[in-house]
Image (cartoon, helix red, strand yellow):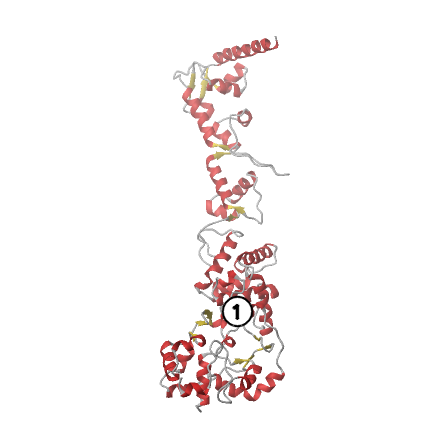
Amino acid sequence: MSRLAELLPFHAGYETVASYFSRLAAACGYENARAFAFHLQLQFQGIVAGREKDLETFAAVLDMPRSSLSAGAIIGDKYIYQISGQVLSRHEMQRLRFRFCPFCVSEDEHRCGGRRGFRAYGRLHWHVSAIRTCKRHGVRLVSSAELARSPFQYDFAANLAAESCRIPRFMESAEAAEPDNLQTYVEKRLKGVRAGADWLDSLPLHVAIRLCEIVGASLLHGNLFRSSGFGDREWSASSGAGYDLLKEGEPAFRQYLQAQVDDFHRGKGSGGERSMFGRLYLTLAHQTTETAFDPIRDIMRDVAIHNLPLGPGDEFLGLITSRKFHTIHSASKTYGIPFERLKKLVLDAGLFPVRNLIEAQAVDRIVTEMAATFNQKEVITKLGVTRKLGRQLINGGLFKPSFKVKQQPGARIIPRYPAEQVTTLLANLRAVANCTDMSELHDLHTSIKRCGCTFIEAINLIRSEKLSKVGWDESEIGLAALRVDPIEMRLLMMRQNRSFRIGRASAQW
């Protein structure tokens, strides 16, 4: 250890390297730390930013191992910092404005060793914005009214000297405060101590801090809160509220988001679907592009997909690749089906949209069914018969509905029939046709009148291939193309009826 290091002790694990360098500069009579750095042929900004070259040079001057400075190094000087092995962003750091506890710096002169007048040192945690209270003294930290001017930026000793005359007044007017639960969590995490919040622990520290702050502020001030008037007191209350909720993990965060969705659907939200999650959405969509927040974006996107008619091609904190729900409007646009027709199909299928949402799989099924099924009117048109005759075939059991639905009170459910059943019936009847000379044959409608049977009896008779003469007129549509001999049909019907009566009498006997 050099004579320079013997002037003042370095409080490893508590003090920043920049603070120690600054105090040594002041103790050696230099006007500021940058002048001292120039003398030592290194850059003070490199010490502030934790650059390896400058830290090695400083350690060599002190005749100390480079590793002895590691615990006090804050690495980074633009957007992302590493402190005590944790990642923080510029938003979570306070470096340009001098921030301290007046009681701590006053006590340091009595409790710490080294040259008098330079014993007060800058704590690592004072640079973390989420730490707003001195736990030892139970007061709010003090921030200087103005930003430090160059060349005194980051220069702890020089800034403390500038504030020294005001320290007694700061102590008298100090605001009593207890650390909020987020601060306690952050302090433990910076010390490498687990606090029982596993999900928050899985996130980078700056993500955990910002998420707690925004969620807590939305709980206390509404999800579109304005933070321009927030001070340490408001942020501390918000941070604590957010941490208390999120310490329970991802399920608690999802419940919070779902509550935001429910409020939106109840009409308490404003600004459209994109502002459903308020400041949290606006922050992650427009104020930061950091990939560190992607796990939060993924959860929010998943909740949105399960509550909004979002589908492939849409954007919600990233590109949507799957769909959970449709509205009638979105389904109409997606499938190219007129709105009113699709709405009727949905209601006919017994689906009653909740919050105007219908499960996408159900809509897919309806559209698929629609493409492969006919309603009663379409069945009648395809068969080429009157409405009355068509209903006879349907009621006679020749066609079965494509699916069964549960009738809802006051709702009229209209069944649909597989198109395959209709085309199969026509194909089977067409295959039975065996007569090319149709001069003595008559259409089905005329034959039924002469025969005195029902329409469905005639169709079943033809399907059973019991008629020796069946024709098919290609110029007609559907069942209107059938041609039969009414005399032959009448004889067959009489035989069947006689057999039926004989069989019934035998059974009675």
Locate the C terminus and report the quarter of the image it occupies: top right
Q: How many marks?
A: 1
Image quadrant of residue 387? top right
Q: Residue 353, position in %: x, y?
A: 57, 46
Q: Residue furthest bottom?
A: 29
Locate the N terminus and report the quarter of the image it occupies: bottom left
Question: In the image, what residue occupies the spot 49% across and 74% down?
Answer: 93
Look at the picture and state if 36 lies above or below 461. Answer: below
Residue 20 is left or right of residue 182, and the answer is left
Residue 477 appears anywhere in the view: no
SS at circle 1: helix
Look at the picture and state if 188 lies above or below 22. Answer: above
The amino acid pointed to by label 1 is Lys
Front residue (pair 25, 242): 25
Front residue (pair 352, 444): 352
Look at the picture and state if 29 lies above or below 433. Answer: below
Question: In the image, what residue occupies the spot 51% across and 89% down?
Answer: 117
Residue 42 is left or right of residue 404, and the answer is left
Q: Residue 206, position in %: x, y?
A: 49, 68
Residue 435 is left or right of residue 402, and the answer is left
Residue 93 appears anywhere in the view: yes
Q: Residues within 10 Å of mark 1 (few under 14, many from 20)?
A: few
Question: In the image, what residue occupies the spot 57% across and 10% down?
Answer: 501
Residue position marked by numbered label 1 in the rendering: 188
Front residue (pair 391, 265): 265
Q: Residue furthest front?
A: 1
Q: Residue furthest right?
A: 409
Q: Residue 499, position in %: x, y?
A: 54, 10
